[in-house]
Image (cartoon, coloured by chain):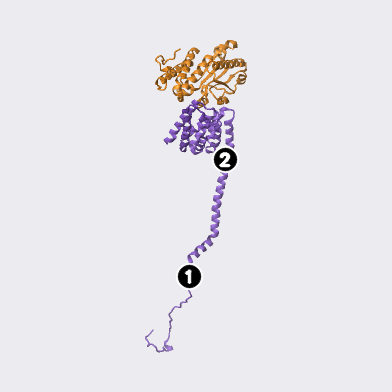
Chain colours: A purple, B orange
Amino acid sequence: MPDHPAGEPIPRSAIRHVRVEGAIEVKQPSPPPTDSKGKDFWDKLTALAPLLSGAVVAIVGYFLTDSVNTSLRREEMQLSNVTEMQGLLLALQGEDSTKWESAAITLSAFGRPAAPPLVTALSVADEVRSPYIESALRAIGFASPDAVCGPMILMLANHSGRISWLMHKSAIRLIGDLRCPRAVPVLQRYGEILSSAISSGSVESYAKIVDPAVPVGAFALERLNEDVQRTLRIVEGD
Amino acid sequence: MAAWAATLLMSCGANAQILPCTAVNEPGRKVLIDEVVAEQPSLAELANTLAIQIEQNLEQLRTEADPSLRVHACDARRPRAPTDFKLDVVEGLLDRDVALEVWARVAAETDASGPHNKVEIGYLIVPVRYFEFNSGTPPGAFVIALRSEPIQSIDDLVPLLNHSGRIAAYAALASGTVLLKSTSLQSRRWDPARTQLCRAMSLLRSAGSARTDAELASYAEELAAQAWSGARADAQYSGFLKTPTAVARCLS
């Protein structure tokens, strides 16, 4: 554009091209301040809710189903164990002595679940079956010490006169073989009772704590005390 | 005799096995008599004679040597061999105060010399079997076999079947062994142990020439010597075994 004195009108003939430059700004009032962050979370949560609830239901369902299935499987296994063990326990209690040893060995293969019925069988076993049942419990105890140590310690701590001294003897031997760590106080107490009876020269005080249906002699008492001392040395040595 | 009628078994091929004996839990020292097995029905009379003879021998032992000893029959108990008496089974018997167990069987056999009857009497001396299980010497469980002609009269067999001397010796040996090892008796054990062991040795030497009996006699003498040396070393003991006249060997 040619120079022209400011303030004076430009003649229309002189205008050939007019270019207008500028910008239009539209201003709107700004929104009031809000907690945009929280709203976003809830918004997102609301948006994700169907998805999340589905996932939660799926996860809970998975674990619940798994837990129920595991529980059912465990019960099925227990039932199966009971059925299979029943035959073996009957063989162990039966008249055919040629089956006793194999029945006891097979029972030990069931592991922990076989311990309770074997302990019960041992508590009433005779001089021929006892060694087989002890061996079976020993085998279970090598794999699962708690399954055998617990019941044996309980047996030995039972001085009510309902457990035979022969069962106590088996318990002492098994505790030693399995090196049951929590047996020391029970063994010490038992040893004190035995030593007291032996030094008094009478089995009377000891006989009170065991089943009177299975009598105990002085020589047997001495040997039982030897077993206790030997077992204590083994268990305390660990 | 009624007990024997129950314990006598005519078992043609019956399973021989060691079954529990309910009598083992009876109180006191005891002797167990298992079933006397006749392998063939034709041998029932011989088996019966044998059963009666064993019973008489044990009764004689009870009255002459040890009235406190009890004799119990174990129905259906039929050991096959001494090896049936494993260490843990024997320990169970020792725990239950069993001194001696006797079993027997009769069978008709034929070998190069012709047909004959075989009589086997098995003995388990419980303490000897237990304490000498690993060494096996002397044997604590063994069988004494006798042979008779089928035509031989049963009455003629009775002297052969009479084992009263042996049974008395085995019972004395069992008793002496337990007494010697009863530490709680302390100095009170030496004299009775020595008496029983010397008696066992003397009876075994006169029982016969069986190798087992000779081994048991030597064992009894060895234990008797231990009783003698134990007594002499025991400060609490002041009995006969400490006198200068007492010697290690048993005096007959």
Q: Quadrant of the N terminus of chain A?
A: bottom left
Q: Nearer the viewer, residue B111 or B107?
A: B107
Q: Nearer the viewer, residue A187 or B146?
A: A187
List x then y, in percent, for residue A208: 53, 31
Callout 1: chain:
A
Q: Report the residue marked by disc 2.
A: A78
Q: Report the residue marked by disc 1.
A: A33
Looking at the picture, which amino acid does disc 2 mark? Gln
Label 1 Cα crowd, 10 Å radius (few <14 / some 14-19 / many 20+): few
Callout 2: chain:
A
- In the rendered view, would you say B182 is above or below A14? above
Report whether B135 appears left or right of A69.
left
- In the rendered view, would you say A35 is above or below B186? below
Residue at 59% across / 11% down in the picture?
B155
Looking at the picture, which amino acid does disc 1 mark? Pro
List x then y, in percent, for residue B119: 56, 16
What is the secondary structure assignment of the residue under circle 2?
helix
Residue at 57% across / 27% down in the picture?
A97
